[in-house]
Image: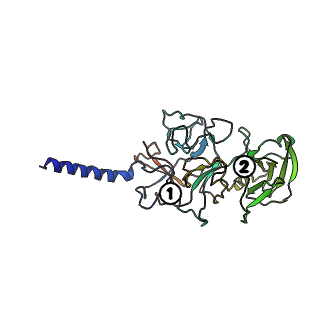
Amino acid sequence: MFAPERRSLILTLLLAFVIVMVSPSSSSIYPFGSKVLPGDLDIGRPLFRLPAETTVAYWDIGTPGYDERDPVYLHIGHSASGTTNANDVRLTFIDNVSPGSKVAFQDFDMNKPLKQLYSIISFLDIHGSRAYDLDDPIYLHHIDRMDHSDHPDYICFEDFENPADMMTGFSERLPFRGREISLPGLGFAIFTDNYKLFISDKILDKKPRKVGEMRGLAIEMVPGLKANYFHVLGTWLIKIQIPKDDESVGSRWEDLSPQFIQTNDIRLSSMGNLIAGTKVTNFDADQNKILAWPPLVSFLGPVIDTAKLGFFDVNGNGVYDYEDDLYLNVPSGESKGVVTVNNVRLSGPIL
């Protein structure tokens, strides 16, 4: 028989051993938005692909259209009513609830109406290596579009000759203030008030022409190879317009996605003192920076790219649920890959 002291020591050692053995297969101890570093306990975890219906969506709680107040979710699985599901992941703060947390049945944001947020996941190439590095911050970059049933945003597909449509579809964008960049496929539309719009297009005529007025302010247009670019002089209002009879409108819309960080984009990892889960605001240090292209993940239409999003099946039941940890599985990017260095954790610890 063991002495009481020795029995206590053995039990303590056994408990410590169990904790060490269990921790790699338990819910993550690491925070939302953190990157997997060498030596982290979750390296090598097998990852499984999320449902094909996974998308990014927002709860429109204020002014119609996506803005700074609207919480954003990784909406996982189909919901017939178009509302938040249990186990959807919050990508932004909402009230006192942190990003990376999951929606539960009793939560106040359960069964709330959602609208798809057309978006991509991309990174800011800090070192200019043109590859995704450990120091590169990750962003969810929203891409506005014109939808006849929703609030009009800056990309639309109407005939610009129609005067009734001239005043619709504008959205505010901070002008480009850096030095001009000489890269293939990128250019600038410059208007007479010196507003500079950074675009992924070739300008056909650099001289802007007046095409209308809005509340007494002139509207100018600069034609491009892919689209026409409108600006209300004296404001930050712009509109990108693609002819609606263009057969390649879908692919052109994707090509026209802005390639720089803009207001209300979401940080999926930290950037200095700007933490994961916060939205970009005007004049932030990372606002207006060029995003790497092509994107890591796209949420631009009905066919959702989920190959680079994976979950670790914590409880081994074969389906995604509350306990499971989510990852941006880049650089490996396989539907049944493993957690590797530089993956981004898209969910936080289960409390």
Observer-nearest of 301 and 102: 102
Q: Write the residue at 69% across / 37% down.
A: 64
Looking at the image, what colour scheme do you see? rainbow
Q: Residue 302 in the image: state x and y as whole percent.
A: 64, 47
Image height of 107 relative to 272, above or below: above
Helix, strand or loop status at disc 2? loop
Closer to the camera in the image, 323 or 14: 14
Residue 207, numbered label: none
Q: Position of residue 206 (x, y in %)?
A: 84, 59
Who is closer to the viewer here, 166 or 300?
166
Badge 2: few (under 14), some or many (20 or more) residues near its Cα, within 10 Å? some
Amino acid type shown at disc 1? Asn
Q: Quadrant of residue 43?
A: bottom left
Q: How many marks?
A: 2
Q: How far across and down, in percent of the image, does residue 305 sit?
A: 59, 52
Question: Which residue is painted at 36% across and 51% down in the image?
Answer: 23
- Pinpoint residue 294: horizontal percent, then vertical percent: 64, 59
Q: CA distance from mark 1 to mark 2?
A: 31 Å
Side of 3 where 126 appears, left or right: right
Which mark, by number, is residue 173?
2
Dot 1 or dot 2, earlier in sequence? 2
Image quarter where the C terminus lies is: top left
Residue drawn at x 75%, y 61% as measured from the top left: 187
Question: Which secondary structure, mark 1?
Answer: loop
Instruction: Give amino acid for label 2.
Output: Arg
Residue highlighted by disc 1 = 343
- Asked if residue 313 lies left or right of residue 222, the reply is left
In the image, taking residue 221 as reference, residue 147 lies left or right, namely left
Report the side of 55 relative to 161 (left or right): left
Q: State yes or no: discs 1 and 2 in contact (Cβ < 8 Å).
A: no
Classify mark 1: residues with Cα within 10 Å, few (<14), some (14-19) or many (20+).
many
